[in-house]
Image (spheres, helix red, strand yellow):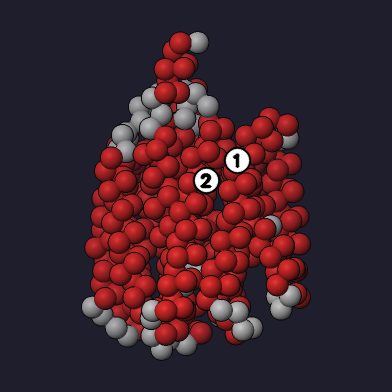
């Protein structure tokens, strides 16, 4: 008992939480407002969709490449630190270059490093939480807090200042991600029986193939939402503040779910949790499609983000943790990211444009 308690106390809770906070704070600046920034720069809807698809497309290759390197070297945090630094460096290029071609080049290079960090940090977090992986949601919720604060802050900011200042804000947040990675300690990896199984022995399992297909399709459905939801609401007459509040509302619901999901996971299986999440995702998209002009129903639809992303993501992280073991954890988290958010997200955005 004393050893278990000591191990739990050694979890660098606030340093892990800090990385999630700044990573998703950056995402909160990016997802709702980057398309508006690109529109302000004179890009067409087609070009915005293509630039967004390029960013997502790098998730198909980059996380898997970095995951293989991380599992081979056992130095996940070194990779995260390197990737975070170069992501910050190359994003600064948006301040100095203009035009579609330059933006496309910078998007690919920046995204190659940006997409390397999170899957490996998920693996690092689970290594630190070896004694109690169900604590993952208690750490991950700080990412949602960061997302909300940024969405609300920038929503109010663009009411009074030009959205052309958005890249400077994102650069600052990217720098904090790098600093957070610098102060996070490496986790010691212990071997297990899973480690004797080759990666192809895992990937060819029917449940792994089904897992990949389900999450790819789930994120395919999210693609148009992430890229065009803010533009869609703006054309319906919603202000920047209201758009930010609606994005924040969805993530508030996600935080509530993260707070209560630990006991829920003791009552229902991961499969049941995923099936419920998929059903509520269908309900959400139907509400947005038909009732976006009614603020109350739109708010209800946004609250369902707790299911469409929150609970489905928690289920995925735990399933990857179970399926891939320690030796292949980096590759497993990378595969989940690349096939769902990468391929699925790219196909979803591509279909929209």
Circle 2 residues within 10 Å: few <14, some 14–19, many ≥20: many
At which x and y percent is residue 294? 74, 75
At which x and y percent is residue 160? 42, 79
Point out which mark residue 259 bears: 1
Compared across the picture, whether 318 is left or right of 79 comes to right
Q: Earlier in the sequence, mark 2 or mark 1?
A: 2
Please say if the residues under marks 2 and 1 sit with CB atoms less than 8 Å apart. yes
The residue sitting at 48% across, 46% down in the picture is 142
Is residue 157 in view?
Answer: yes
| Callout 2 secondary element | helix
Q: Quadrant of residue 340?
A: bottom right
Q: What residue did someone put label 2 on?
A: 141
| Callout 1 secondary element | helix
Give the spatial CA distance, label 2 vs label 1.
Answer: 8 Å
At which x and y percent is residue 293? 71, 78
Q: Along the line of sight, which residue is nearer the eye, 168 or 335?
A: 168
Count the labels in the image.
2
Q: Quadrant of residue 134?
A: top right
Report the residue that reaches farthest toward the front: 160
Q: Quadrant of the C terminus?
A: bottom right
Is residue 285 in view?
Answer: no
The residue sitting at 48% across, 40% down in the picture is 139
């Amino acid at each position: 008992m004393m050893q278990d308690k000591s191990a739990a106390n050694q979890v660098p809770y606030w340093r892990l939480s800090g990385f999630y906070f700044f990573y998703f704070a950056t995402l909160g600046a990016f997802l709702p407002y980057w398309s508006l920034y690109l529109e302000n720069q004179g890009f067409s809807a087609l070009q915005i969709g293509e630039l967004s698809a390029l960013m997502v497309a790098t998730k198909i290759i980059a996380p898997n490449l970095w995951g293989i390197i991380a599992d081979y070297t056992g130095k996940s945090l070194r990779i995260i630190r390197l990737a975070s630094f170069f992501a910050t460096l190359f994003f600064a290029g948006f301040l100095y270059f203009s035009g579609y071609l330059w933006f496309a080049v910078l998007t690919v290079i920046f995204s190659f490093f940006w997409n390397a960090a999170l899957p490996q940090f998920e693996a690092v977090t689970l290594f630190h939480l070896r004694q109690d992986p169900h604590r993952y949601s208690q750490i991950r919720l700080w990412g949602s807090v960061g997302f909300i604060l940024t969405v609300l802050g920038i929503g109010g900011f663009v009411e009074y200042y030009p959205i052309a200042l958005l890249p400077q804000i994102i650069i600052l947040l990217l720098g904090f991600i790098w600093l957070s990675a610098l102060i996070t300690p490496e986790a010691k990896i212990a071997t297990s029986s899973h480690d004797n199984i080759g990666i192809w022995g895992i990937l060819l399992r029917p449940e792994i193939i089904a897992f990949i297909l389900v999450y790819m399709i789930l994120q395919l459905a999210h693609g148009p939402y992430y890229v065009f939801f803010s533009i869609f609401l703006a054309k319906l007459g919603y202000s920047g503040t209201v758009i930010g509040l609606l994005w924040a509302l969805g993530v508030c619901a996600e935080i509530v779910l993260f707070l209560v999901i630990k006991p829920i996971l003791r009552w229902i299986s991961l499969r049941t949790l995923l099936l419920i999440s998929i059903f509520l995702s269908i309900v959400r998209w139907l509400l947005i499609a038909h009732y976006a002009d009614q603020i109350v129903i739109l708010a209800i639809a946004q609250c369902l983000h707790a299911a469409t992303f929150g609970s489905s993501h928690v289920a995925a992280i735990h399933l990857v943790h179970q399926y891939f073991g320690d030796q292949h954890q980096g590759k497993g988290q990378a595969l989940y990211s690349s096939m769902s958010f990468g391929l699925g997200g790219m196909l979803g955005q591509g279909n929209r444009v």
